[in-house]
Amino acid sequence: MKRLLLVGMITLLAFGLTYAGGERMTNQGTHSLNFLMNGLGNFGVSGFPAGSAGGSWMYGFGGSYFIQNDLAIRAGVSFNRWNENQTTTGGESDDTQLGFGIAPALLWYCVGEGAVAGYWGPTAMFGMFSDESKFTPTSGTGSSTKTTYTDFGFGFLMGAQWWAWSQVAFNAEYVLAYHTSSSKVESGGTSTDGPTDTFIGIYSWSVGLSLFFAR
C-alpha cells in the first residue's frame, strides 16, 4: 500500500506536467472542502480524517484556507455523540459514547508547475473517545463503567495535489509522526490506567478529493 501511494504521488506529478488539467488554486483567500477517497475495493468518498482514538480513525469535516499565496492552514474536525437508553423488568441501562478529534496542519505549496503542486508542512492530531455504561436496578445499588481513550501526535506531512478540472483536485500524501495512545477505565469508584503505546514512523497515507473556491 505504501509503495502504491508513492507511485500515485509520482504519477500525479508526472501526469499533471503532461496534461493541462484545471487551474492551480493556491492564491491568498482561496478555500477548499476536503474529503478522503476510499480504496479500490470499496471506492467512494468519506469524511476527512481528524485524528484517531483507541485504534480507530475519526472522520469529520475537513477544510483548508490560504492565508497567503502558496501557504494554507488545513484542519480536520470530528465530533460524535451517541446514546442508548433501555428499560427492562430489572432496571434501566444507559450507554453513552462521545468522540472528538482534530488534526490541524500548515501547508507550503512549492514543487511543480501548472495544475500540479507538491506540498509539505507540520501537522498535529488529537483524539478522545469515551464509552460510559450505567445500570440502575429497580432496587439495590446501580453500577457504571467508563472507558476513555486518548491519542495525541505531531509530525510532518508531504504530498502532491493535481487540479484535474476547474475547482476539483486530487491529492496523495504521507504523514510521518510521533504518536502516543493511552486509555483509562473507571468503575466502582476506582480508576485503572491502561497501557500507553508510542509509535514513531509513517502514521498514515491517504488519497483525497478537494473542492476549491476562490475568494
Image (cartoon, grey):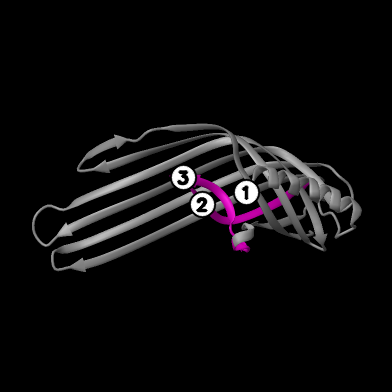
Indicate left or right for 180 with 90 as reference: right
Q: Position of residue 193 (x, y in %)?
A: 33, 34
Q: Inspect the image, locate mark 2, and give the three-letter code of the amino acid beneath it.
A: Met
Amino acid carrying mark 1 in the image: Ala
The answer for how far apart the CA atoms under marks 1 and 2 are is 13 Å
Q: Which residue is mark 1?
A: 75
Seen from the viewer's position, the closer of residues 140 and 173 is: 173
Which residue lies under the disc numbered 3? Answer: 55
Rendering coords of residue 56 (x, y %) = 47, 48
The part of the image, by quadrant, that contains residue 25 is bottom right
Is residue 114 highlighted in magenta? no
Between disc 1 and disc 3, the foreground one is: 3
Q: Earlier in the sequence, mark 1 or mark 2?
A: 2
SS at mark 1? strand
The 10 Å Cα crowd at callout 3, few under 14, some 14 to 19, many 20 or more, is few
Disc 3 on helix, strand or loop?
loop
**Residue 46 placement, left or right of 98:** right
Tag 1–tag 3 contact (CB < 8 Å): no
Calculate the distance from the C-alpha at mark 1 to the C-alpha at mark 3.
Answer: 20 Å
Looking at the image, tell me whether mark 1 or mark 3 is earlier in sequence order: 3
Q: How would you classify the magenta stretch by its main secondary structure?
A: strand
Give the residues drawn in magenta, as a range: 42-68
Residue plotted at (46% across, 57% down): 80
Residue at 79 percent of width and 62 percent of height: 167
Residue 26: image location, x then y, percent: 81, 50
Which residue is the site of mark 2? 58
C-alpha separation, residue under disc 3 versus residue under disc 2 = 10 Å
